[in-house]
Image (tube, rainbow, N blue to C red):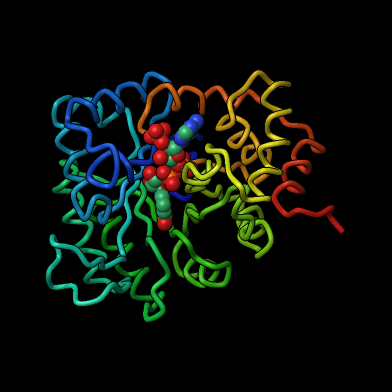
Amino acid sequence: MIQSLEELNCSTIIFGTMRIGKWGAKLDSQGILALIEGCLELGITTFDLADIYGDYSTEGDFGKALALRPALRDQMQLITKCGIRMMCDARPEHRIKSYDAGAAHIIASVEHSLKEIQTDRIDVLLLHRPDWLSDPDEIAEAFTQLEKAGKVRSFGVSNYTPSQFALLHSRFPLVTNQVEAHLLHLQPFNDGTFDQLLQHKIRPQIWSPVAGGALFQASEDAQIQRIHKVAKGLMEKYNASMDQILIAWLLRHPSQMMPVIGTTKLSRVEAAVKAQAIQLTRVEWYDLWQASTGHEVA
Ligand SMILES: NC(=O)c1ccc[n+]([C@@H]2O[C@H](COP(=O)([O-])OP(=O)(O)OC[C@H]3O[C@@H](n4cnc5c(N)ncnc54)[C@H](OP(=O)(O)O)[C@@H]3O)[C@@H](O)[C@H]2O)c1
């Protein structure tokens, strides 16, 4: 059984697909294919999807693009997610938004994702959000069934608290917890999320690594202004762009974070790849931390 993202040869930088379709750039198949090919040329082999992206349409868009060059499938690792029942026109039966990590939902969702992506296997399946009604033994049973059938190669979670992660990990080996982390969201540094992953030598995947774009415009917000001021100095020192500094800040952490980048532009994907060469000093890392918190560490 696959127990780590290394065994799958996942790339450190992961390409996130949330904004490529209906929820963002609305790229056509050729546009998506160009992004996929560009990523692969840059050494980004891992792609992050979810059943719900684009109101349940982005997996299908990605699959149509991949169908134009099916041989690419063997050069990549595909992550997808399940467990959110979202309200939208594509799911009129969803009366309210809710979570579902029951076995029936997990298995049906994987079958649907395989069809949409036009592939015979998912490399990493993540439970998108913790479902308070889920039974860890039932989840483990569903994961085992999918793994034995060759439909999913490895399993992880997203947005789980450390205790939720520990509980499920005690029943089934998880390969990651995909969480939000950036200079405007420091919570996982403080709540035990990264400590736990370090303890188990499991690499975190980081969503919204450049704060979802929130740090790129001038702002009246004092926190953003402090971050801009420190980042500007580092951009000059390293001859780097703001997004590169933000990614380098994450990569400086010992948990070996894997940023899931959400850009839809290849030039920014290339910048993210190059950011891996920037080694911020310990003091520079704390400079940015202090800019975010607004005070000196205790
Ligand atoms: N597990 C979860 O619950 C969860 C939640 C949210 C997202 N995700 C995953 O994480 C991925 C990334 O999330 P995200 O899109 O919020 O991440 P992000 O990489 O922090 O933000 C991407 C946004 O920032 C903009 N941007 C990037 N560099 C820029 C620059 N130099 N100047 C101006 N704008 C810039 C991008 O626009 P351009 O396209 O113009 O570059 C895009 O709108 C998603 O695609 C998805 O796969 C997972």
Viewer-side residue, 145 vs 177: 177
Q: In this view, does 27 lie to the left or right of 281?
A: left
- Where ligand 1 lies, by quadrant? top left
- Could one spot residue 244 in this view of the protein? yes
Q: In the image, residue 27 lies at what x, y percent?
A: 22, 33
- Could one spot residue 14 in this view of the protein? no
Q: In which quarter of the image is residue 297?
A: bottom right
* The C terminus: image quadrant: bottom right
| Residue at 25 percent of width and 31 percent of height | 73
Q: In this view, does 187 lie to the left or right of 58?
A: right
Q: In the image, residue 186 lies at what x, y percent?
A: 64, 55
Viewer-side residue, 168 vs 295: 295
Vertical placement of residue 59 versus 43, above or below: below
Q: In this view, does 104 lie to the left or right of 218?
A: left
Viewer-side residue, 41 vs 197: 41
Vertical placement of residue 77 versus 141, above or below: above
Q: In the image, residue 199 lies at what x, y percent?
A: 66, 56
Q: Residue furthest bottom?
A: 133
Q: Residue furthest front?
A: 220
Vertical placement of residue 271 versus 15, above or below: above
Q: Quadrant of residue 42?
A: top left
| Residue at 67 percent of width and 50 percent of height | 223
**Total labels drawn:** 0
Q: In the image, residue 212 lies at what x, y percent?
A: 47, 45
| Residue at 22 percent of width and 45 percent of height | 22
Q: Which residue lies furthest to the right in this view?
A: 298
